[in-house]
Amino acid sequence: MGGLYYGIDLGARTTIISYWQNRMSDPVTMSTVVGSDDIEIPTALAKRPGLSQWFYGKEARERAGDGSAVEVPSLMENAIRDRKLTLDGRVYEARDLFAIFIRHLLELNGAAARPENIAKITFTAQRFDKEEIDLLTDLMARLSLSLDQLIVLDHREAFYYYALSQRTELYSNDVLLLEASGDQIQSCRLHRYLQTRPQQVTLSDSFYEMHLENRDMEFAEVCRKLLSEGKCSTAYLVGDGFDGGWMKESLAVLTKECHVFVGKNLYSKGGSYAGRARDGEKAWPFSYLGDQEMKFNLLIKVSDRNKAHFLTLIEAGDSWFKASGQCEVILDGSPEIELWIQRPESRQAKIDLLKLEDLPRRENRTSRLRISAEAVSDREVRVTILDLGFGEIHPGSGKSWVHRVRVE
């Protein structure tokens, strides 16, 4: 496929954007200033009074500071809450303003933000809740893009895609992600099970509190502990907490055992790599179910020409906010539907039996049902069954049954 693969690490304070396209060796991280290493773009938008002229990022903050523009208050928060804002005497939808900001980011590389130019946009953040997912799905419509062009990853999964897109020697053993924010350091260890096909990947977390007066020595002890738990090929250090040049003993501990990289664009680049992998632009012999992917398959057992088989309504591994399925069946036998729930790592399935109370009595095989399944989270699906009847002979009753399927 052609097109651009964007990775956007989205934050209420700053945003980082990278992109990849054919013939590029690695994703490129963009700045609002050509040739600058300043990749952290303030999540800000401002309007020149009396004109339809918008400024974004650092320029928005500067112009708002000198009074030549009016800044949108709490741009991302108001967009998440779907509020209306009055700016320069006019009422705007906060989500329209957020779309203007994102469109400016997408056009930093000189390409117009047209649907045909974009293969995938991957948004990353520490975590996403349902309201934030709703904002991003709404954003795609405002940019005239489809949900098929959207990927949402938490930072752990962006790390997974980044780490396994590097040279093989950088992930021949475990890989560590170390993120420092304030006085807390979070570690994430990536481990591959080499005997499985595809290779199953696990990510395990741990958290450490640092005392700022002796954090180098404390962090060195954390590094020794992590390295003692398994051989590591590489450690990636991200986050503002590593700024200031305070790492001396701790870096010596890490570099003695593994490759070490420090930077702030791992997540945005990981988003670009994720788009490539999911589109088949890059071979991906790994498997990992992140927080945004469905954790189970939902199937129903049907008979077609006297042969029984399973029909998948929801598939494990699909992005939960896109996962849905629908089919129409003719009821054969008692008024009940069997829903089969199967985890991808198991051959066994659990059966949920949904009884269709008050379904009109009809001759066998004269009740047609529409079964719709829609994910409401990565672990829960809402199933709706509607009685369609059987043509003019047995008109549909309009009755419906709603059932929730959940796995822990």
Image (tube, rainbow, N blue to C red):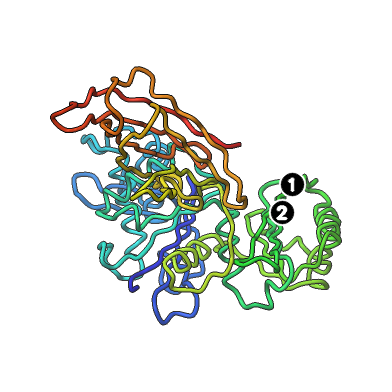
In the picture provided, is 325 more to the left or to the right than 29? left
Q: How many marks?
A: 2
Q: Are marks 2 and 1 in contact (CB under 8 Å)?
A: yes
Q: Report the amino acid beneath label 2.
A: Ser
In the picture provided, is 350 more to the left or to the right than 171? left
Q: How many residues crowd around disc 2 within 10 Å: few (fewer than 14), some, or many (20 or more)?
A: many
Q: Report the amino acid beneath label 1.
A: Phe
- Residue at horizontal 27 percent and vertical 27 percent from the top: 363
- Residue 97: x and y in percent read 30, 45
Question: Vertically, is 311 above or below 383?
Answer: below
Give the quarter of the figure containing the N terminus: bottom left
**Residue 85 shows in the view:** no
- Residue holding disc 1: 207
Q: Secondary structure at mark 1?
A: strand
- Residue 397: x and y in percent read 23, 22
Question: Vertically, is 328 above or below 234?
Answer: above
**Is 279 in front, or is 259?**
279
**Is 169 in front, or is 321?**
321
Q: Image quarter for residue 177?
A: bottom right
**Is 361 in front, or is 240?**
361
- Residue 290: x and y in percent read 56, 51
Q: Secondary structure at mark 2?
A: strand
- Residue at horizontal 77 percent and vertical 72 percent from the top: 258
- Residue 232: x and y in percent read 77, 68
Question: Vertically, is 172 above or below 220?
Answer: below
Q: Residue furthest top?
A: 358
Q: How many residues crowd around disc 1 within 10 Å: few (fewer than 14), some, or many (20 or more)?
A: few
- Residue holding disc 2: 187
Residue 287's label in the rendered image is: none
Which is more N-terminal, label 1 or label 2? 2
